């Protein structure tokens, strides 16, 4: 009986008295499932005894059906092994992988952390502790803002390392920045706001995400001091989304004068600022600037995530909202996401409380700084005409090509050589600028970085020919 209880289940239905024997019906349904791809190659099937018990038919009928399908090549039947679906030609072509799925031989993508360094054992300890200690009530839907333990830990951590001012009641756990802004955008739209300023250049995916909420993204120029507040004031959108601690993709830090002007604009015009604090923990030449939210908690909606600090696949993010938006956000979560996954939240709360986030960040700062230095030195050696822009922070740098270079051609030549990277023009809307490559240094080790830059130099030369 124990073997039967562990057997895989199989969806089969019979029409008794249909003029077709039960054995023939079983053969036909299994044959069609394999042909149509519902039973994929290698899929294990129940044993003859287990399937007979599941379907309430004699074992002999199943033995006969399996034998026939084995003879036809649909099943692989081996002694002392479960029956498996044979590897037939696929009934339809596999879809091509998306851009984010491509495996680059030389991965210099600017938007990825070193996910190979994810502290698996420490995370497993926290997950086990969360699962063991969680009361039964934590397995229900619970508060739509997320597990209280996480919200309490986040408020403490963010106040300590980012200068964020908040309370657990104002804090929301969510599935990364994408869901966070989806919720915020929904609240802004429901309140009658229609336009939101976005940085130009700014991450192209963020701009598309903004548009999907129903808000009109209004491009606002960015220079070496961050977003142009005079241009923002002239456009006067209903809100603004920006990355003040380390602007993507220019690498600029919002200057103190611009910070003050931005907050004055928000207060004077009754506007909200959405702060995307995506990688501020990684600054290599000095301490990072504090979060903008700490200067005006009533006007700034603070967003962060574990995507750059730990790994994107965790899908853990958070919002610290002004008190005036809390009820609207609760309502938005309730009728969209319902409630975020809770066990991962409890694990992350334990991870924070045990100091594992701090320890991981200390390790990664040293690692990323070495890799950034290796990238800079390799560029100086292989492409000495390139200028490095942006502060020493985050997971990437901006490499400005000399005048006359065609950024699009360089990108095409680089990708043809298996180099994953991005270009500044891919993130521009209205602004014009110098041909610039965005090169990440988080994924590759130092020797691999040096090899990647050699290939990049080949691509630049080929694009100039």
Image (spheres, grey):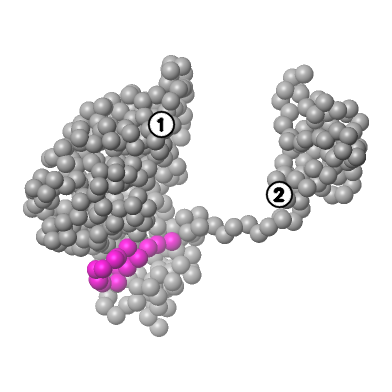
Is residue 207 covered in magenta? no
The residue sitting at 47% across, 55% down in the picture is 100
Q: Position of residue 158 (x, y in %)?
A: 24, 34
- Which label sits on residue 357? none
What residue did someone put label 1 on?
339
Mark 1 or 2, nearer chain start: 2
Instruction: Specify the segment rendered in magenta.
Output: 420-436
Say which of 383 and 112 sits in front.
Answer: 112
Q: Position of residue 464 (x, y in %)?
A: 37, 80
114 sits to left or right of 219: right
Nearer the viewer's eye, disc 1 or disc 2?
A: 1
| Circle 2 crowding by C-alpha within 10 Å: few under 14, some 14–19, many from 20 | some
251 sits to left or right of 134: left
Q: Position of residue 215 (x, y in %)?
A: 30, 53
| Circle 1 crowding by C-alpha within 10 Å: few under 14, some 14–19, many from 20 | many
Depicted 233 relative to depicted 330: above or below? below
Element marked by disc 1: loop
Would you say the residues marked 1 and 2 are in contact, meaning their CB atoms lie under 8 Å apart?
A: no
Element marked by disc 2: loop
**Does residue 357 appear in the picture of this structure?**
no
**Does residue 43 appear in the picture of this structure?**
yes
- Which label sits on residue 37? 2
């Amino acid at each position: 009986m124990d073997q039967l209880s562990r057997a895989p289940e199989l969806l089969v239905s019979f029409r008794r008295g249909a003029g077709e024997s039960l054995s023939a019906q079983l053969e036909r349904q299994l044959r069609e499932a394999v042909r149509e791809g519902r039973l994929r190659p290698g899929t294990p099937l129940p044993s003859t005894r287990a399937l007979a018990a599941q379907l309430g038919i004699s074992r002999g009928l199943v033995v006969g059906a399996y034998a026939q399908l084995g003879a036809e090549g649909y099943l692989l039947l081996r002694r002392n092994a479960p029956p498996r679906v044979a590897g037939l030609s696929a009934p339809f072509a596999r879809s091509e992988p998306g851009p984010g799925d491509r495996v680059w031989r030389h991965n210099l993508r600017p938007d990825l952390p070193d996910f190979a360094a994810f502290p698996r054992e420490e995370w497993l300890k926290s997950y086990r502790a969360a699962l063991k200690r969680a009361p039964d009530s934590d397995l229900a839907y619970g508060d739509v803002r997320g597990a209280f333990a996480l919200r309490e830990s986040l408020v403490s951590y963010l106040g300590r390392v980012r200068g964020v001012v908040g309370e657990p009641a104002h804090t929301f756990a969510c599935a990364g920045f994408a869901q966070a802004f989806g919720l915020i955008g929904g609240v802004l739209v429901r309140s009658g706001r229609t336009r939101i300023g976005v940085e130009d250049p700014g991450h192209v995916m963020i701009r598309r995400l903004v548009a999907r909420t129903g808000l009109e993204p209004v491009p606002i120029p960015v220079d070496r001091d961050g977003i142009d507040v005079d241009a923002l004031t002239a456009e006067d959108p209903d809100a603004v989304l920006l990355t003040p601690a380390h602007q993507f993709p220019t690498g600029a830090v919002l200057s103190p004068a611009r910070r003050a002007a931005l907050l004055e604009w928000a207060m004077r015009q009754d506007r909200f600022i959405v702060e995307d604090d995506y990688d501020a923990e990684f600054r290599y030449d000095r301490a990072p600037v504090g979060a903008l939210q700490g200067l005006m908690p009533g006007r700034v909606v603070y967003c962060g995530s574990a995507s750059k600090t730990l790994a994107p696949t965790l899908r853990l993010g958070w919002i610290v909202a002004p008190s005036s938006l809390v009820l609207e956000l609760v309502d938005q979560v309730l009728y969209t996401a319902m409630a975020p996954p809770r066990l991962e939240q409890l694990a992350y709360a334990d991870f924070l409380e045990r100091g594992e986030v701090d320890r991981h960040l200390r390790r990664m700062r040293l690692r990323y700084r070495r890799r950034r230095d290796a990238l800079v030195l390799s560029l100086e050696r292989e492409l000495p005409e390139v200028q490095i822009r942006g502060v020493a922070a985050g997971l990437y740098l901006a490499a400005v090509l000399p005048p006359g270079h065609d950024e699009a051609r360089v990108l095409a030549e680089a990708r043809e050589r298996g180099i994953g990277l991005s270009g500044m023009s891919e993130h521009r809307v209205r602004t014009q600028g110098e041909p610039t490559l965005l090169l990440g240094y988080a994924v590759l080790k130092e020797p691999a970085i040096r090899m990647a830059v050699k290939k990049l130099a080949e691509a630049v030369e080929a694009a100039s020919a």
